[in-house]
Image (cartoon, rainbow, N blue to C red):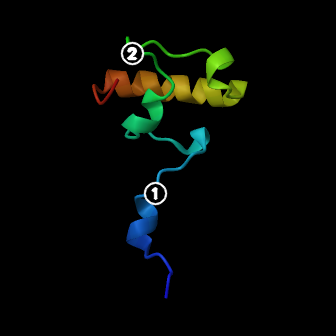
Amino acid sequence: MDLMSTEDEQHVKSRNPEKFTILDKESLSRYTTDTGKILPRKYTGLTPMQQRKISKLIKKSRHMQLAL
């Protein structure tokens, strides 16, 4: 059988920005510059709601000193 186990499914990263968590360092780093600034919607291509959520996650992640 080629069915994936539940362990394999948990390691797959979601591409939907609305499902990111503060622990998704690689995913969130796509939305920041090398100096750590959050990219504007013009460059990210996110909807306003998604951009707000990503911005809040990045700020929480910084506050918790997890990333970026």
Q: Name the residue under label 2.
A: 34
Picture quadrant where residue 36 is located? top left
Please tell me which residue is depicted at 72% across the width and 28% down the height of the picture.
47
Picture quadrant where residue 50 is located? top right
Q: Mark 1 points at which residue?
A: 12
Q: In the figure, is residue 48 to the left or right of 67?
A: right
**Amino acid bearing label 1:** Val
Label 2: state its secondary structure: loop
Q: Which of 68 and 33 is in front in this view?
A: 33
Whether residue 22 appears in this view of the structure is: no
Please tell me which residue is depicted at 49% across the width and 88% down the height of the picture.
1
Number of marks in the rendered image: 2
Q: In this view, does 57 lie above or below 59?
A: below
Q: Position of residue 51 (x, y in %)?
A: 62, 25
Give how far apart the Cα atoms at labels 2 and 1 are: 25 Å
Q: Nearer the viewer, residue 50 or 3?
A: 3
Q: Is residue 14 above or below residue 65?
A: below
Please tell me which residue is depicted at 50% across the width and 82% down the height of the picture.
2
Q: Is residue 26 above or below residue 51?
A: below
Q: Position of residue 3 (x, y in %)?
A: 50, 80
